[in-house]
Amino acid sequence: MNPLLLPSAGAPTPQSRIILAQVSTPSAGLDWSYTVPNHYALEVTNIHARFLASATVATRSLRILFTSAGNNVTQAVQTSQPTASQDLRQFYGQGVGVSSTITIAGIVYNVLALPRCVLQSGANIQSLTDSIQVGDQWSSIVVQGIAYPLGS
């Protein structure tokens, strides 16, 4: 689907709706994924998630990958790498100009740019954690966006 054909792409319309989807927490050591609902195109506006690294030392790299029909559409990449036993709160958002990191009471908050794109029904949004360890845990995952209804 060409996002230019959507009515007022990027802004809610009477036909569109804002969604806030709580993604199931995966088992420790696994990444998460979310599938765009049937009969909708979705412009993801932000993603919130928590990543708790286990005590195992490893060079982890966190990415959010957008795929459609098995093809990579785009991705958001965290440039800093989580260390062992680190507790991170990830916020990926449209309109974030410069990625930033702040640590408060031992918790690391990362604010990262999210590429703007509209995904068709059945497209997938997923975390892709390089060198994920058995005890690493993603949780509190929320995908928010504007859903545009498609013809049945």
Image: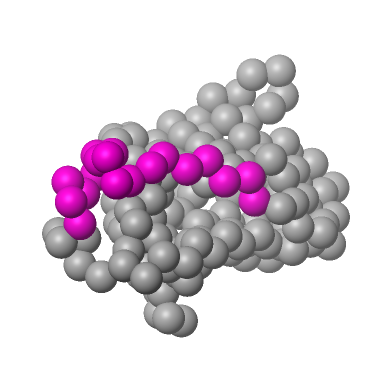
Residue at image position (76%, 57%) is 26
Q: Nearer the viewer, residue 62 or 41?
A: 41
Please state, as top left, top right, bottom left or bottom right, where the N terminus lies in the image: bottom left
Decide which of 103, 44 is in the foreground and name it: 44
Give whichever of 6, 99 is nearer the camera.
Answer: 6
Position in image of residue 107 (x %, y %)? 68, 27
Above-or-below relation of 70 to 123: below
- Give the residue at x 14% y 59%: 4
Tell me: 38 left or right of 2: right
| The C terminus, quarter of image | bottom left
Q: Is residue 20 magenta?
A: yes
Tell which residue pokes out farthest to the bottom in this image.
70
- Whole-percent x, y for residue 97 in the image: 29, 35
Dominant secondary structure (helix, strand or loop) of the stretch shown in magenta: loop
Residue 16 appears in view: yes
Q: Is residue 147 left or right of residue 124?
A: left
Q: Is residue 16 left or right of residue 123?
A: left
Q: Is residue 47 visible?
A: no
Residue span colored magenta: 6-23
Which of the 4 image quadrants contains residue 12?
Answer: top left
